[in-house]
Image (cartoon, rainbow, N blue to C red):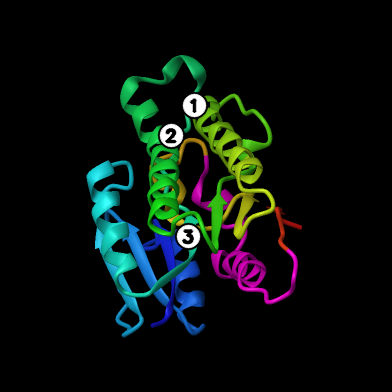
């Protein structure tokens, strides 16, 4: 049975690049996303649903565990809402918090299935977890929450076979910003990092056979 990589939000953007790169390795890749992908590979399987839906996550993780050994979990799914502080409404807040909810649900359920043994958890956040921004207040709040959760996982599993990596990329040239053109124009987006290059940096660190662990990975433009 193959080792398994689970990635959330793997149908588009950075997640799609991670799936594509990971399929070049000797892995079974399972994608949890609300949208279907275009991948057609014997070593690829997708589960369509909302990562903030507890029942969907419980079912999916259980099904995946029956396919082989879950070795990697990459929590990548998330949606932005870029507005000035006074403009945020509940719909925007709920959208931003889905990524944090999914990260917690996927991590907790995978840890239970794995009996808290031999697992690498990779939480892809944003440079928004390292600073504040006047047009990203709620988005930053959720990313700072994800960072707090990631740091807590590191403490909880220090000295065990559970390894936790926090990833903090800056702007990436994907359709992540498509509903925020008043904030990030197409021209500005085109100056951001190539998602395939970012995926390679992340995956090369995750899949390294060296007897060490990269605890935090900050990726910025030159």
Which residues lie in the magenta part?
A: 184-212
Instruction: Tell me which numbered mark, 1 or 3, is placed earlier along the sequence.
Output: 3
Q: Which residue position holds label 1?
A: 138
Residue 182 - label: none
Asked whether disc 2 touches disc 3, contact meaning CB atoms under 8 Å apart, the reply is no
Question: In this rendering, does residue 49 appear at all?
Answer: no
Closer-to-camera residue (92/154): 154
Residue 88 lies in quadrant: top left
Judging depth in this view, the residue of 62 and 193 nearest the camera is: 62
According to the picture, the residue beneath numbered tag 2 turns out to be: 81
Label 2: element kind = loop
Q: Nearer the viewer, residue 161 or 88?
A: 161
How far apart marks 2 and 1 lie (CA) works out to 8 Å
| Secondary structure state at the residue bearing disc 3 | strand
Query: Quarter holding the N terminus?
Result: bottom left
Cα separation, mark 1 vs mark 3, equals 25 Å
- In the image, what residue occupies the spot 68% across and 32% down? 131
List the residue tagged with mark 3.
73
Q: Quadrant of residue 54?
A: top left
Q: Quadrant of residue 95?
A: top left
């Amino acid at each position: 049975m193959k080792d398994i990589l689970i990635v959330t939000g793997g149908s588009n953007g950075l997640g799609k690049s991670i799936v594509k790169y990971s399929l070049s390795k000797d892995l079974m890749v399972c994608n949890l996303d609300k949208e279907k992908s275009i991948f057609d590979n014997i070593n690829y399987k997708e589960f369509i649903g909302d990562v903030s839906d507890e029942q969907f996550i419980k079912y999916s993780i259980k099904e995946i565990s029956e396919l082989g050994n879950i070795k990697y979990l990459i929590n990548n799914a998330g949606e932005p809402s870029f507005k000035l502080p006074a403009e945020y409404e509940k719909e925007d807040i709920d959208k931003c918090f889905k990524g944090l909810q999914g990260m917690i649900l996927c991590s907790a359920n995978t840890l239970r299935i794995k009996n808290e043994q031999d697992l690498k958890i990779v939480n892809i956040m944003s440079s928004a977890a390292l600073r504040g921004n006047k047009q990203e207040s709620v988005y930053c709040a959720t990313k700072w929450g994800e960072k707090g959760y990631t740091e807590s996982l590191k403490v909880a599993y220090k000295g065990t076979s559970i390894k936790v990596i926090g990833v903090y990329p800056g702007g990436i040239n994907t359709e992540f910003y498509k509903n925020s053109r008043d904030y990030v124009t197409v021209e500005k987006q085109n100056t951001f990092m190539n998602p395939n290059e970012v995926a390679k940096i992340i995956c090369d660190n995750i899949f390294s056979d060296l007897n060490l662990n990269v605890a935090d990975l900050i990726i910025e433009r030159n």
